[in-house]
Amino acid sequence: MLAESGHFVFVCKPASHPLIQEYINGLELPGHTLQVKRGGQRVTHRFRWMSQVPLRDGKDALPVNWFEIEIRNAAGEVTYRNSFITDLPVGRDNVAELAACGRARWKIENETFNVLKTSGYHLEHSFGHGKQNLAALLVSLNLLAFAFHTVCDKAEELWRRARSKAGSRAQFFGNLAAITTFLIFPSWEDLLQTLAFVKPPPRPP
């Protein structure tokens, strides 16, 4: 990552990085506490950090900046705890933002895979085909379709109206398959008009 002139925020669990854990054990580390409203309740976010910790044993070890987030509910119970490493400076002013970035990686990954598995893309089913190249090809097509659909969700108003009319993404794909089995549409716009407004397509001349 650094060789490509990028930055990183990676998960750093105590079991996988014991040397870092040794460094922070017993130390009075800088800390920061925030009260965050979540729904109708307030939770407490507690942060700790330490700079320039060696990533592993050895003189050539990369120095990294370590930080931790701990979330407690209104009763004081710990509901979440995780630690991260980064090459970016860590301090009171940005530790909450860096923790949000670290947590967002898993949110993005989990929600993306959830959509691909349960919302009409059948990703798990596609993995079962072909022992050499077919499974990888089907997954690539799945990801391309998801990318194009995401662009349409963001940029194409008629697409959004058609999607909202169907309710769920899977139902929208079902409607697409069913309606194009029985009707011919002169254009993609005519198809979306029918799905969005229950408007019949133009009769062929």
Image (spheres, rainbow, N blue to C red):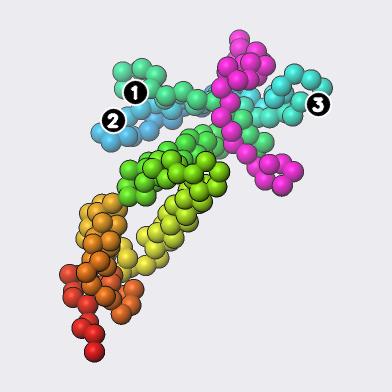
Quarter of the rendering containing residue 159: bottom left
Q: Is 27 part of what is drawn in magenta?
A: yes
Q: State how far apart marks 2 and 1 are (Cα).
A: 8 Å
Query: Horizontal and vertical percent for residue 41?
Result: 28, 30
Element assignment for label 2: strand
- Residue at 20% from the left image edge and 83% from the top image edge: 203
The three-letter amino acid code for the residue at tag 2 is: Gln
- Residue at the (44%, 52%) spot, across then down: 142
Identify the residue position indicated by label 1 in the image.
73
The nearer-to-camera label among 3 and 1 is 3
Q: Amino acid at mark 3?
A: Asp
Estimate how packed mark 2 is, as few (under 14), some (14 to 19) or many (20 or more) residues with alpha carbons within 10 Å: few
Is residue 134 depicted above or below 77 in this figure?
below
- Locate residue 98 relative to residue 182 in the image: left or right: right
Tell how many labels.
3
- 46 displayed left or right of 86: left
- Quadrant of the image occupied by residue 174: bottom left
- Of pointers 3 and 1, the one earlier in the residue sequence: 3
Q: Which amino acid type is marked by label 1?
A: Asn
Q: Quadrant of residue 114?
A: top left
Q: Are marks 2 and 3 in contact (CB under 8 Å)?
A: no
* Mark 2 or mark 3: whose residue is earlier in sequence: 2
Q: Is 27 rendered above or below residue 122?
A: above
Horizontal and vertical percent for residue 11?
A: 56, 29
Q: In x, y percent, where is residue 118?
A: 33, 43
Q: Which segment did they paint magenta?
A: 1-28
Identity of the residue drawn at 68% across and 41% down: 1
Disc 2 vs disc 1: Cβ atoms closer than 8 Å?
A: yes
Q: In the orientation shown, which residue stands out farthest toward the bottom? A: 205
Which residue is farthest top?
26
Residue 138, compared with residue 111, is above or below; it is below
Q: Earlier in the sequence, mark 2 or mark 1?
A: 2
